[in-house]
């Protein structure tokens, strides 16, 4: 008998998480927390958070301080941790997995006083589940306008919270069915405060659907794959998905080391190998996957936000010594810098169908007829040690050395309170 994606997820709820997936989840927990603390510190969402504090009391903490009921904390923390758009990505899933799953699992973990080890275990399973749902939904779901961080992410948040609370198979089925009526999020919100809100809504959905199912609420037996279910009504491809055994997809998470659109990162990493004087550049040609041409190819940005979606701008910034890993580098002023504008004019970007979404190639023409060719693939494996070092450097840039060190220690331990104290600023 053919099992639907719902049947597969129900079986998956009891899977043993491999050690490498747990190790990756620990790193993503640290990165997610650093992004959330930095996102809260901008103050951009202060009024939004204040409205959520006014809803009522609860034991689940908010990043930056305060607390509320678990669904409210999941909403707040999911939103704040995606505010900078600097959190992890999975390219096969086409989404940001941690910002949907971790806030949901963490909010419930505080209510039941679970150890941090259980949070990491449940979040890893939830992240993997969100990737499986993302693969099942496929590219057409994303291309038509749905934000998979929010849609597939909500189902991942259900699976993570269901794991934490040890729901049985009937309860998980009900939770997934409830989620099918709740998961939402549109790419039309990109560039607004509603994009990070999409992540928060996914986290809240995960908490609510799980708690409601645990309380006995029923739903469609196959809310995902039924003829009128989520996939069929949301332009899903219903792609074949195989449950992982030893080799989990989530170990291929890509962390951001540049504070801009992830479509630019392969190009920026390629530039790390540059061995030429910028004054000798006559022309520079960037080749990228076709998908990124409509996402991050603003040719002449005039704001700091637009700069984060521009090959020419970020390439010029890098070659001129500006730190693309620093949030503060992306200002309106930098887009008008005469040296940046002059170098930007020498840069051409074109699509190349043979490249994957994680690859970029650069051809540089120098004075005297010399050429340089650079290439990078974000799918190139990084050892956990190298990745950890890069994430610690990123956290230092976001939070400062002392706070980054304290957060690292808390995220790698097993005391949930130590981590939540760091998140709240206690």
Image (tube, grey):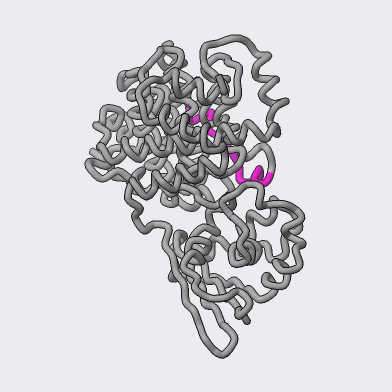
Instruction: Work out whether 285 lies above or below 391.
Output: below
Residue drawn 65% across the image and 19% down it: 52
Instruction: Work out whether 163 lies above or below 393.
Output: above
Q: How many labels sit on residues?
A: 0
Residue segment shown in magenta = 179-191
Figure quadrant of the C terminus: top right
Residue drawn 40% across the image and 36% down it: 127
Residue 47 appears in view: yes
Q: Nearer the viewer, residue 314 or 8?
A: 314
Residue drawn 53% across the image and 57% down it: 263
Quadrant housing residue 391: top left
Q: Magenta: predominant secondary structure element?
A: loop
* Percent of width and height locating residue 40: 62, 31
Residue 228 appears in view: no
Q: Please indicate whether residue 132 sits to the left or right of residue 371 in the image.
A: left
* Percent of width and height locating residue 262: 53, 53
385 within the magenta span = no
Residue drawn 72% across the image and 72% down it: 342
Figure quadrant of the N terminus: top left
* Percent of width and height locating residue 221: 38, 26
Furthest residue in direction bottom, as rendered? 368
Q: Nearer the viewer, residue 286 or 171?
A: 286
Furthest residue in direction front, as rendered? 402
């Amino acid at each position: 008998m053919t099992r639907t994606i719902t049947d597969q997820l129900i079986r998956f709820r009891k899977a043993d998480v491999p050690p490498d997936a747990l190790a990756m989840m620990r790193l993503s927990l640290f990165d997610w927390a650093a992004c959330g603390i930095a996102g809260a510190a901008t103050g951009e969402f202060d009024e939004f958070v204040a409205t959520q504090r006014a809803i009522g009391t609860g034991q689940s903490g908010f990043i930056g301080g305060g607390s509320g009921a678990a669904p409210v904390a999941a909403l707040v923390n999911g939103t704040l941790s995606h505010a900078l758009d600097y959190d992890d990505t999975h390219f096969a899933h086409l989404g940001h997995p941690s910002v949907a799953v971790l806030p949901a699992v963490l909010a419930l973990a505080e209510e039941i006083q679970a150890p941090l080890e259980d949070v990491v275990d449940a979040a890893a399973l939830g992240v993997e589940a969100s990737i499986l749902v993302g693969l099942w939904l496929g590219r057409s779901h994303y291309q038509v306008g749905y934000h998979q961080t929010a849609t597939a992410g909500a189902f991942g948040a259900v699976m993570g919270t269901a794991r934490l609370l040890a729901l049985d198979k009937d309860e998980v089925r009900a939770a997934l069915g409830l989620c099918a009526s709740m998961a939402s999020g549109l790419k039309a919100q990109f560039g607004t405060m509603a994009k990070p809100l999409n992540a928060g809504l996914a986290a809240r959905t995960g908490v609510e659907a799980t708690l409601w199912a645990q309380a006995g609420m029923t739903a469609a037996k196959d809310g995902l794959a039924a003829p009128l279910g989520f996939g069929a009504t949301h332009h899903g491809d219903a792609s074949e998905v195989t449950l992982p055994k030893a080799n989990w997809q989530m170990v291929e998470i890509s962390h951001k080391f540049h504070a801009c659109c992830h479509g630019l990162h392969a190009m920026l990493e390629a530039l790390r190998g540059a061995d030429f004087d910028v004054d000798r550049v006559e022309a520079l040609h960037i080749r990228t996957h076709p998908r990124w041409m409509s996402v991050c190819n603003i040719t002449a940005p005039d704001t700091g936000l637009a700069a984060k979606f521009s090959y020419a701008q970020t390439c010029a910034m890098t070659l001129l010594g500006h730190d693309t890993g620093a949030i503060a580098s992306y200002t309106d002023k930098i887009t008008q810098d005469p040296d940046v504008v002059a170098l930007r004019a020498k840069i051409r970007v074109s699509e190349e169908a043979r490249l994957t979404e994680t690859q970029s190639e650069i051809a540089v023409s120098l004075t005297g007829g010399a050429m340089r060719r650079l290439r990078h693939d974000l799918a190139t494996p990084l050892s956990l040690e190298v990745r950890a070092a890069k994430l610690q450097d990123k956290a230092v840039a976001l939070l400062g050395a002392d706070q980054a060190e304290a957060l690292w220690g808390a995220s790698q331990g097993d005391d949930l309170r130590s981590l939540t104290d760091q998140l709240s600023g206690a």
